[in-house]
Image (cartoon, helix red, strand yellow):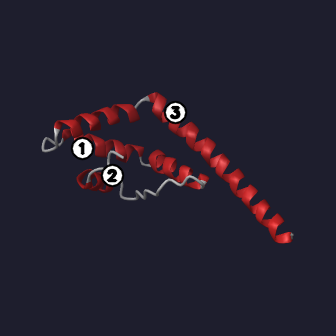
Amino acid sequence: MFFSASTYRWQILKKECLSLTVKPLSDTRWESRVDAVKVLKYNLGSINDALYNLFNDSSRDRNTRNLAKSLTSKIKSYKFVCSLFVWYNILSKLNVISKLMQNRCNLTNNSI
């Protein structure tokens, strides 16, 4: 939400994360949750760099700079990084199970 709330912030993020593809979160698809966490997991360093650049940009308002600084310290915390990796592993496994169950349901429905 922080980056998407401003076109300037979004451009800073895109400059740092060249391979960044953000997808919308879906209430019904586990895979969308995996994708959302995966983007964060694999681009954490670049996201941190973008936040750092925003914090050091004196042309930005104080609120934006303070929020960027706060987010930078939070995403660098041990608790956040561990939670991110654990959450990604859990969601990845749930996604596989969800797909298997969907395939079995489709096979059962098609055979009836």
Task: Name the side, left or right, on which 108 lies relative to 70.
Answer: right
Sequence order check: which comes first, mark 2 or mark 1?
Answer: 2
Outermost right residue: 112
- At label 1, the amino acid type is Asn
Residue 99, compared with residue 93, is above or below; it is: below
* Inter-mark Cα distance, 2 to 1: 16 Å
Task: Name the side, left or right, on which 26 lies relative to 18.
Answer: right
- Residue at left offset 29%, top offset 42%: 51
Q: Secondary structure at mark 1?
A: helix
Residue indicated by mark 3: 82
Q: Secondary structure at mark 2?
A: loop
Residue indicated by mark 2: 4
Sequence order check: which comes first, mark 1 or mark 3?
Answer: 1
Task: Name the side, left or right, on which 86 lies relative to 94.
Answer: left
Q: Secondary structure at mark 3?
A: helix
Residue indicated by mark 1: 53
Q: Position of residue 7 (x, y in %)?
A: 26, 55
Q: In the depicted view, which residue is nearer to us: 44 or 111?
A: 111
Dividing the picture into quadrants, the one containing residue 20 is: bottom left
